[in-house]
Image (cartoon, rainbow, N blue to C red):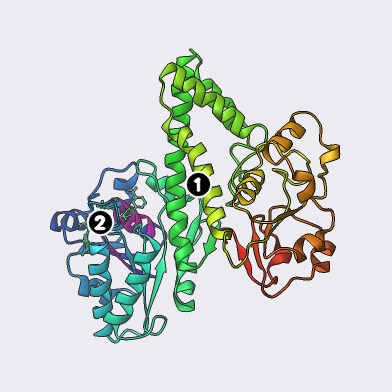
Amino acid sequence: MRISVFGLGYVGAVSCACLAKLGHTVVGVDVAEEKVARLNRGECPIIEDGLPEIVKQMHAEGKITATTDAAKAVNDTDVALVCVGTPSTPSGGVNAKYLEAVCKQIGELVRDSDKEFFTVLSRSTSLPVVHDRLVEILAESAGCEMGDRIGYVCHPEFLREGAAVADFFDPPKIVFGATDDKSAEVCKQLYPGIEAESFFLDMRIAAMVKYADNCYHAVKVTFANEIGVICREMDIDATKVMEVFCRDRKLNISARYLRPGMAYGGSCLPKDLRALLDMSRQTAAPLPMLKGVSKSNKVQIEALMKRIISPDRPRVGLIGLAFKEGTDDIRESPMVTMVEQLCGKGHPVRIYDKHLSVQALVGANRSFALQSIPHLAELLSQDLQGVISESDVVLVSHKLTPEQWASIKWRDDQRVLDLAKVDELRGAPGYQGLYW
Ligand SMILES: NC(=O)c1ccc[n+]([C@@H]2O[C@H](COP(=O)([O-])OP(=O)(O)OC[C@H]3O[C@@H](n4cnc5c(N)ncnc54)[C@H](O)[C@@H]3O)[C@@H](O)[C@H]2O)c1
């Protein structure tokens, strides 16, 4: 393909050289004349391991050129990769002025050309709302509908500076969020020979994947450092702790605990987090992130309460009270907190939990249950349909069998709030997923 790359910074320079290496003919575009001149001399405009050699070779083979003339670049190519900067605004938002300017410029150039179709891929990191705006700008400046003569793809970049060339040829994943089928077809030809899982997603989801990634990386670094802080107080080698932590690929370095859903609870997570936070108070070793975790968990419950409380629908039914399915352990279950708060506000509550009966509860579990909800026995019922029939809002935190879901008779005026991502519930009237 003939590809123009707008912005010859870290992302653009790597993209130029490596796309050329894959066999494409690439034209780099930048407003900075020095960067353009360097690339045209076969020199690398940035310092990046392994990149100068590729730039030199691709320049010698005539596979990359550079220009400050956007019109020439658009005319000579069919696809543009936009890699301009998206710095922060004073309030921390995305300053999209460079992105917007480039999209407007490309749109107008396409409008004034005789091109049948031109695809714009944005590698710059920006929020979904910015991509929405860029699509509007492109359609308006090109004077056509998206997918007609111009298409747009949110194509986030996951490379790490210092390992950017290696990451380009062996990426962790490839993500595309295209506005139209023609652009999606272009995406399929962009990386010949590169083996990585590719995702064709809704544009806004594609944009959010990048933010989820980078926020997670920031959380990981901070988490490891807070474990470091508290270990240091106890004269424990944190690198050894984290080394063993990382060897656990089943629960730690895995997809476990990473699905959006109900707040955490149970007999261990809240208790053990409290112990570290108590230690941090005693030793004056601040752990702001871990402290924030506990606060954030409470916010989840508060937000859920706000979603369900309504004077028009006072009666609340719960399917599942234990903190996890397949157990009768209700210690520190977030659903118990919900019941406490709902009862406190005078909402009639009914609970179905097939593993739970007050008579069978023993030990700490029983004390917790009766301390939190002294009249729990009155709220519990083994009659699933009865609980649902007597409720205006049904909160589902456990999965039931397909037969049980199929047997339920919902009312049209009911609201069903799914906290457990139950596929069988999707058709229920008034269905709402927690985060989906
Ligand atoms: N640096 C990274 O490791 C990395 C990784 C992934 C994603 N990203 C994202 O990629 C984007 C680019 O990052 P970067 O670090 O390469 O930025 P950068 O600041 O190094 O480079 C941006 C380039 O765009 C050029 N530019 C500005 N306006 C232009 C215009 N109208 N036409 C042509 N060129 C123009 C600038 O002169 C500059 O050379 C950002 O959104 C960033 O968040 C960066």
Query: Which residue in the protein does label 1 denote?
Result: 299
Task: Say which of marks 2 and 1 sits in front.
Answer: 1
Q: Is residue 11 magenta?
A: yes
Question: In this view of the protein, can residue 127 be seen by the observer?
Answer: yes
Q: Amino acid at mark 1?
A: Val
Image point 44% across, 16% down: which residue? 283
Q: Is residue 195 visible?
A: no
Tell me, yes or no, whether the highlighted magenta stretch contains residue 350: no
Q: Is residue 418 above or below residue 139?
A: above
- Between disc 2 and disc 1, whose residue precedes? 2
**Which of 19 and 175 lies nearest the eye of the viewer?**
175
Mark 1, other Cα within 10 Å: few <14 / some 14–19 / many ≥20: few
Q: Position of residue 96 (x, y in %)?
A: 27, 62
* Image: magenta residue range: 4-19
- The image's mark for residue 416 is none
Is 234 rendered above or below residue 313?
A: above
- The C terminus sits in image quarter: bottom right
- Mostly what secondary structure, the magenta segment? helix
* Image point (71%, 65%), residue name: 425
Residue 362 location in percent, x, y? 81, 32
The residue labelled by disc 2 is: 8
Closer to the camera in the image, 416 or 90: 416
